[in-house]
């Protein structure tokens, strides 16, 4: 057929995980933990299944989960969203992102995003007939030039998509960036889609800068998060979005025909988990900081240059001292000959990205990280 997405292939995550399996390499490519989530969460899932909570959940999500999300938001960001009209449970962050983009972007609308950018944004914008305006950020800081940003805005700009802590660069915005964003868009009718799936994995000085903590921005914003990251259960595919009632209503119009509702017992179990073991997400940054530090230390004798990591469970490594291959070729070579699979950065960029950077996932058991580091130190 005449494809609506002619240039699109299989995602890099699927490709690299398949290659890792083919060569039995240590898979530090696709982002997922190689350890399990909390026992309590698993027990609550089984309990709810056995209680018969196995029929459709309400379209917007089960009430206890929406309420727990609202309370967590209030505690963290100083604003209590209305659980009934401003919190929506989705099938992972992926669905929330797609529903938000579909709900807001009209044919011909311009959408600003920052490259490197997570791979699911662009296809959703294209399917809605939107036009992406990409701002290319440069390593090692991947900082935004707010002057350049302001100049890119036009009367057709409808949406800005941001992601902090940022996959794949592992950098994080500060509250000052949110302030700059607000200054630039305040006089225009522009909405913000803020991908905050790594909100609880942030090592930056000031902590995670959420769009929800900004009193003006949050009136224009849809904030997206995911329990896959927070509870080490990427396969459960439960996420959510928080937005003002009028924006949530638009997102829900799409959500109700995209998935209608999300796995009932998983939602109830997640509500129990948020209520009973808040220390899990409260200690998540410390948990991952220890893994980051262990991995960085283990790589200190390698010829890779490790970039600063302010958040997410990814580490960027510059392999300029090791190889002249481009990053895609290098990741294939590394998987096949060194036995470690990684993700090339250029696949997240529309413009040529000539840097020699790869992304390594450290959401792994210490033994996995040590074994991978030992192989990488042989480079
Ligand atoms: N956004 C970003 C930046 C991500 O890294 C991911 C998953 N790795 C997602 C969205 C998708 O999250 P989910 O698995 O909950 O759909
Ligand atoms: N978001 C995960 C990553 O960045 C992958 C998710 C997926 O495989 N679609 O690795």
Image (cartoon, rainbow, N blue to C red):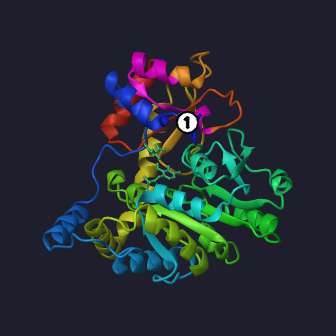
The secondary structure making up most of the magenta span is helix
The front one of 81 and 199 is: 81
Q: Is residue 376 magenta?
A: no
Q: Provide residue 246's location: percent of width, then percent of height.
A: 60, 79
Q: Specify start and end residues of the magenta stretch as a single range.
A: 331-348
Q: Residue at the location (54% across, 55% down)?
A: 203
| Image vertical order of residue 153 relative to residue 115, above or below | below
Q: Provide residue 324's location: percent of width, then percent of height.
A: 62, 15
**Cβ of mark 1 under 8 A from ligand 2:** no
Q: Quadrant of residue 56?
A: bottom left
For disc 1, the marked residue is 8
Q: Is residue 342 magenta?
A: yes
The front one of 344 and 240 is: 240
Q: Residue at the location (45% across, 65% down)?
A: 257
| Image vertical order of residue 232 relative to residue 24, above or below | below
Q: For numbered disc 1, what is the local secondary structure?
A: loop
């Amino acid at each position: 057929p005449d494809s609506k997405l002619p240039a699109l292939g299989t995602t890099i995550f699927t490709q690299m995980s398949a290659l890792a399996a083919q060569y039995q390499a240590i898979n530090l490519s696709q982002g997922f933990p190689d350890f399990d989530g909390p026992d309590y969460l698993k027990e609550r899932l089984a309990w709810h299944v056995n209680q018969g909570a196995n029929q459709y959940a309400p379209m917007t999500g089960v009430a206890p989960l929406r309420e727990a999300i609202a309370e967590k938001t209030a505690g963290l960001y100083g604003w209590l969203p209305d659980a009934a009209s401003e919190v929506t449970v989705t099938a992972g962050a992926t669905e929330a992102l797609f529903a938000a983009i579909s709900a807001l972007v009209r044919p011909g609308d311009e959408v600003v995003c920052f490259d490197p950018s997570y791979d699911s944004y662009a296809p959703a914008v294209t399917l809605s007939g939107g036009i992406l305006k990409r701002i290319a950020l440069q390593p090692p800081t991947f900082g935004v030039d707010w002057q350049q940003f302001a100049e890119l805005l036009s009367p057709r700009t409808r949406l800005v998509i941001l992601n902090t802590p940022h996959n794949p660069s592992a950098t994080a915005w500060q509250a000052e960036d949110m302030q700059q964003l607000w200054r630039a868009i305040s006089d225009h009718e522009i909405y913000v889609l803020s991908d905050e799936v790594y909100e609880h994995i942030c090592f930056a000085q000031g902590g995670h800068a959420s769009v929800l903590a900004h009193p003006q921005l949050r009136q224009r914003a849809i904030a997206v998060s995911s329990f896959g990251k927070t509870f080490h259960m990427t396969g459960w595919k439960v996420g959510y979005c928080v937005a003002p009632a009028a924006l949530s209503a638009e997102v829900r119009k799409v959500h109700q025909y995209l998935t209608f509702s999300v796995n009932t017992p998983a939602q109830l179990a997640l509500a129990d988990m948020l209520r009973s073991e808040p220390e899990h997400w409260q200690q998540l940054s410390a948990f991952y900081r220890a893994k980051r530090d262990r991995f960085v230390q283990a790589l200190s004798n390698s010829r890779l240059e490790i970039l600063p990591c302010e958040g997410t469970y990814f580490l960027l490594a510059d392999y300029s001292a090791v190889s002249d291959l481009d990053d895609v070729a290098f990741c294939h070579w590394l998987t096949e000959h060194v036995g470690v699979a990684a993700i090339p950065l250029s696949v997240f960029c529309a413009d040529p990205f000539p840097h020699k950077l790869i992304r390594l996932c450290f959401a792994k058991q210490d033994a996995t990280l040590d074994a991978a580091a030992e192989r990488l130190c042989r480079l």
